[in-house]
Image (tube, helix red, strand yellow):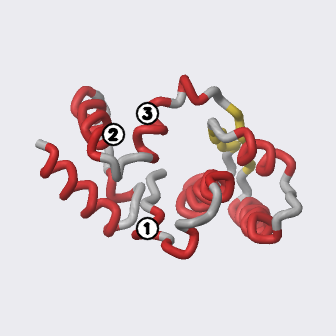
Amino acid sequence: MYVNWALDYPALCSLHINYKETFTIVLAAHRWAPFWSGYQVVVKSDSPVAAAILKKGSTYCPVIMDWIRSLFWLKEYYNFSLLVKRIPGTTNTLADSVSRLDNVHYWSTFQAWLSESPVSYDLESHMSSLSLALLRYKGSAAT
């Protein structure tokens, strides 16, 4: 899931990457929970901290703990389970490109991947309208 921190969540923009990695997974769960009802969902993350926090289901950090609680109730309400798997960053290149789409270099890489992919992707359902507008602008400026 793509998040442009400055546009979508400016209050969280200055937080450490460990907060952002954890928040993005919780944010994705909030967005997709109605569709996950009755399923076990596997989330792959190259962040060892986010993976450990979400696997454990607790942390000493009160901010992240609020997010974990919201995730707990979301899982209960929609009846899904979340399995977080840690993957090496070297095998997570597409996700890394998506997370850096505000950089024109990565936008070009992602656009190339989209054009080669046999599957049609609806970016509008994966990011805010502000972020999508920025990416479309930067993508047209890069070409």
What whole-number distance in Å separates the C-alpha atoms at marks 2 and 1? 17 Å
SS class, disc 2: helix
Nearer mark to the viewer, of 3 and 2: 2
Residue carrying label 3: 94
Q: Is residue 119 rendered to the left or right of residue 35?
A: left
Query: Percent position (x, y) of residue 51?
Result: 73, 43
Q: Is residue 140 rendered to the left or right of residue 34?
A: left
Query: Percent position (x, y) of residue 110?
Result: 31, 37
Q: Residue 106 carries which label?
A: 2
Disc with the residue nearer the chain's start (3 vs 1): 1
Q: What residue type is labelled 1?
A: Ala
What whole-number distance in Å separates the C-alpha atoms at marks 3 and 1? 22 Å
- State the image quarter where residue 136 is shown: bottom left
SS class, disc 1: helix
The residue under the point 32% across, 68% down is 130
Q: Which amino acid does label 3 sit on?
A: Leu
The residue under the point 27% across, 61% down is 134
